Image (cartoon, grey):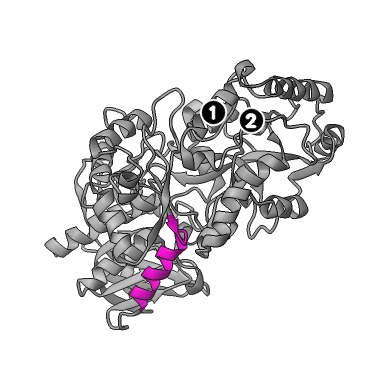
C-alpha cells in the first residue's frame, strides 16, 4: 500500500511532528508551541503515562557552575568538566560530533538546563553529590550531581500543564499510537505514519519531524546483540530496567533512510538489579543503588576481588567486572544498620520524600536512617532474605541460589576476617573496600549516606540480596549535528529530520562516550531538545 492510499484513511497536517512524549519530546514541543508552531505529538503510552523514563526516574543531573556548587565552595568550570568528560568518555578519533556535544553540554548546562528549570518553577536540593569519581580513569574531579526537588516527575508535570494549555488548533496529542514508518513525499521525509491499538493508521504530514522515541534498552535481545565488546558475552539472565516502548524500531527505520547510527555498543547498564516483585512486563527489574558497605560475593559466596566492588566510582567498570566473570548472579551481604543508611532503589516511586517534597521526612531519614524500604523488599521480593544469624542467612541464600552450592565455610571465614580487622580499629584497616568508603565519606553529603565501618555480623539482623545486571540506557544512537539534525552516512543533514534525547545517544550519536559522568541523561535530553527548537525558530 503506498503513502497516498494510506493518507486517505486519516490525514493530519502540522508544522512539526514530535515522535515521543518523554522529557526530550515534551521540551521540544513546548518550545515550538511557544513559537506559534502547530505541533503533533505521537506517543505509544496512554495519556496519563506520558513522560517516558523521566516520569519514573529519580532526577539527578550533572550541572556545572550552579549556585549550589558556589555555595559549597566547589570550584568547577566548563574547562574542568570537559577534561573530566574526555577522560571518562574515551572517545575515538571519529567521534567528532560526540565531542562537540560534550563541549556544548559543559558550556550550556547552567543556562539551558539549570536556569531553564528554575524558570519553570523547579527546584534543586541544596546538596551536591559526588558520583562517578573514577577508578582506573579519572571521572568527576569535583561534585556536580544535583538532585531535583520533586524528582524528574516534577518536570514532566510542569511541561504537561504548560503544553496542554495551548489550544487544540496548535496542538495534537496522539497517545497509544505507535509510529510504524516515515511519510515520504518526493523522496523527502514529510512526517510519519502511526497506528493506534486497533491498527487504524494515521498519517501526520509535517515539514519537520523530531524523533524523541528513546533508545532500544527496553528490548533485551537488542541489548544483548549490542553488548559492549570488552564486557565479554551478555548474561542470559539480564533484567530490563527500561520501558518496553524503547524497542529501537525507529532506529531501523531511520537507518533505511540512510541515517548514520553510531556507538550502539556503548550503553549504561547497572550492576545491582533485582526482578520487580510486581512486574508489569517480562523480566522487569528494579535498579538498586549498591550498598557501599556490603560485602559483594559471587554465587558461591566467594568475595569478589582482589579489588572489591564498590559503587560511586565507575558504574561501567562494575558491570564489566561482573559480566566478564560470567556469573549467573551475585550477592550483597549486609546488615540492618547498613541498609537503613545506604540501601536505595533508583526511581521516584522508591524515594517518596523527594518525589513528594517532604522536607521533614527527608531530613529524618537522612540523619536517622530508614528501615521501611528494606523491610518492604524483604517482605515482598524473593531476592531479599534476612536472618538473625549468619548460619541461618546462608541457609536461606542456598534456597534461592538456582541450584548452586554456597561454600558456607568460605563465606563465614571471609566475613569474620573482615569483621575482625574492622573491630581492631582504623590503624589496622588494610582493605580496599574500606579505603574507598573512607574516601567517599570525606564529602559531607556522601558521608550522610555511607556508613562508618563496623563489623557486619554483630548486628541483630543480617540481610542478603541476590543481584543481576540490569539494562538502563543506550549511550549511542542516531548521529546528529549541533542543530539536532539527523546526519546521513556522508555527514550531511537529512532534510526535515531531527533526533533528540536517547534516540540520538543524548546528542551526536553518543556524547557520553563509553561512560557517563552520571546525571547527563535528563539534562542531555533538555539540551538537545532546545537545539532542535532553536534551529527551527531561525530557519523555518
* Quarter in which the N terminus is drawn: bottom left
Marks 2 and 1 in Cβ contact (< 8 Å): yes
Q: Which of 418 and 70 is in front in this view?
A: 70
Q: Name the residue under label 1.
A: 438
Q: Is mark 2 on a helix, strand or loop?
A: loop
Residue 135 vs 11, above or below: the answer is above
Q: How crowded is mark 1: few (under 14 residues within 10 Å), some or many (20 or more)?
A: some
Residue 444 vs 196, above or below: the answer is above
Question: Residue 150 lies in magenta, yes or no?
Answer: yes
Q: Based on the displayed image, in which of its 4 quarters is residue 238 positioned?
A: top right
Relative to 310, is 21 on the left or the right?
left
Task: Identify the mark nearer the N-term, 2 or 1.
Answer: 1
Q: Which of 181 and 317 is in front in this view?
A: 317
- Region rendered in magenta: 148-164
Q: Is mark 1 on a helix, strand or loop?
A: helix
Estimate the x, y position of residue 78 in percent, counting from the top left. Answer: 24, 39
Inspect this view and state whether residue 351 appears.
no
Residue 335 vs 110, above or below: the answer is above
CA–CA distance between discs 2 and 1? Answer: 8 Å
Estimate the x, y position of residue 14 in percent, counting from the top left. Answer: 26, 74
Estimate the x, y position of residue 140 in percent, counting from the top left. Answer: 38, 34
Q: Mark 2 points at which residue?
A: 453
Q: Residue at x 75, y 55 (%)?
A: 380
Relative to 191, is 391 on the left or the right?
right
Q: Which of 238 and 108 is in front in this view?
A: 108
Amino acid at each position: 500500500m503506498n503513502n497516498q492510499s494510506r493518507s486517505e484513511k486519516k490525514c493530519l497536517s502540522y508544522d512539526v511532528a514530535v515522535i515521543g512524549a518523554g522529557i526530550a519530546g515534551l521540551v521540544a514541543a513546548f518550545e515550538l508551541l511557544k513559537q506559534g508552531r502547530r505541533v503533533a505529538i505521537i506517543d505509544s503510552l496512554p495519556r496519563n503515562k506520558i513522560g517516558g523514563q523521566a516520569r519514573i526516574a529519580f532526577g539527578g543531573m550533572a550541572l556545572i557552575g550552579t549556585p549550589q556548587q558556589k555555595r559549597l565552595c566547589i570550584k568547577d568550570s566548563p574547562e574542568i568538566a570537559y577534561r573530566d568528560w574526555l577522560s571518562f568518555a574515551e572517545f575515538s578519533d571519529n567521534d567528532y560530533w560526540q565531542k562537540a556535544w560534550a563541549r556544548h553540554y559543559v558550556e550550556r548546562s547552567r543556562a539551558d538546563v539549570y536556569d531553564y528549570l528554575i524558570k519553570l518553577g523547579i527546584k534543586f536540593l541544596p546538596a551536591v553529590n559526588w558520583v562517578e569519581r573514577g577508578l582506573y580513569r579519572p571521572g568527576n574531579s569535583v561534585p556536580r550531581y544535583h538532585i531535583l526537588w520533586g524528582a524528574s516527575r516534577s518536570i514532566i508535570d510542569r511541561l504537561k500543564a504548560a503544553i496542554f494549555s495551548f489550544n487544540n488548533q496548535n496542538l495534537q496529542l496522539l497517545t497509544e499510537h505507535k509510529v510504524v514508518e516515515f511519510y515520504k513525499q518526493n523522496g523527502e521525509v514529510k512526517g510519519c505514519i502511526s497506528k493506534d491499538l486497533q491498527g487504524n493508521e494515521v498519517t501526520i504530514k509535517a515539514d519537520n519531524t523530531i524523533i524523541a522515541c528513546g533508545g532500544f534498552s527496553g528490548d533485551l535481545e537488542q541489548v544483548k546483540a549490542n553488548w559492549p565488546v570488552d564486557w565479554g558475552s551478555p548474561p542470559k539472565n539480564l533484567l530490563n530496567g527500561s520501558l518496553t516502548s524503547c524497542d529501537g524500531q525507529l532506529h531501523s527505520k531511520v537507518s533505511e533512510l540512510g541515517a548514520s547510527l553510531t556507538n550502539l555498543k556503548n550503553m549504561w547498564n547497572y550492576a545491582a538489579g533485582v526482578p520487580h516483585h510486581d512486574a508489569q512486563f517480562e523480566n522487569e527489574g528494579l535498579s538498586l543503588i549498591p550498598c557501599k558497605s556490603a560485602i559483594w560475593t559471587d554465587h558461591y559466596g566467594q568475595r569478589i576481588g582482589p579489588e572489591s566492588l564498590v559503587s560511586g566510582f565507575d558504574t561501567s567498570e562494575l558491570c564489566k567486572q561482573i559480566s566478564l566473570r560470567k556469573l549467573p548472579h551475585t550477592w550483597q551481604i549486609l546488615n540492618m544498620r547498613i541498609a537503613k543508611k545506604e540501601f536505595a532503589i533508583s526511581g521516584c516511586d522508591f524515594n517518596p520524600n523527594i518525589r513528594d517534597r517532604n522536607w521533614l521526612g527527608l531530613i529524618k531519614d537522612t540523619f536517622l536512617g530508614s528501615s521501611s524500604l528494606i523491610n518492604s523488599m524483604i517482605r515482598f521480593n524473593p531476592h531479599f532474605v534476612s536472618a538473625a544469624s549468619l548460619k541461618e542467612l546462608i541457609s536461606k541464600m542456598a534456597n534461592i541460589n538456582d541450584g548452586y552450592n554456597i561454600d558456607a565455610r568460605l563465606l563465614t571465614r571471609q566475613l569474620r576476617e573482615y569483621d575482625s580487622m574492622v573491630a581492631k580499629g582504623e590503624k589496622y584497616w588494610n582493605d580496599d573496600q574500606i579505603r574507598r568508603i573512607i574516601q567517599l565519606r570525606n564529602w559531607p553529603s556522601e558521608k550522610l549516606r555511607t556508613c562508618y565501618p563496623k563489623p557486619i555480623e554483630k548486628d541483630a539482623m543480617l540481610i542478603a540480596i541476590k543481584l543481576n545486571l540490569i539494562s538502563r540506557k543506550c549511550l549511542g544512537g542516531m548521529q546528529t549535528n549541533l542543530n539536532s539534525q539527523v546526519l546521513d552516512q556522508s555527514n550531511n543533514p537529512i532534510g526535515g529530520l531531527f533526533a533528540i534525547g536517547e534516540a540520538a545517544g543524548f546528542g551526536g550519536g553518543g556524547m557520553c562516550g563509553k561512560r557517563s559522568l552520571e546525571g547527563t541523561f535528563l539534562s542531555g535530553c533538555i539540551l538537545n531538545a532546545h537545539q532542535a527548537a532553536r534551529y527551527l525558530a531561525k530557519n523555518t
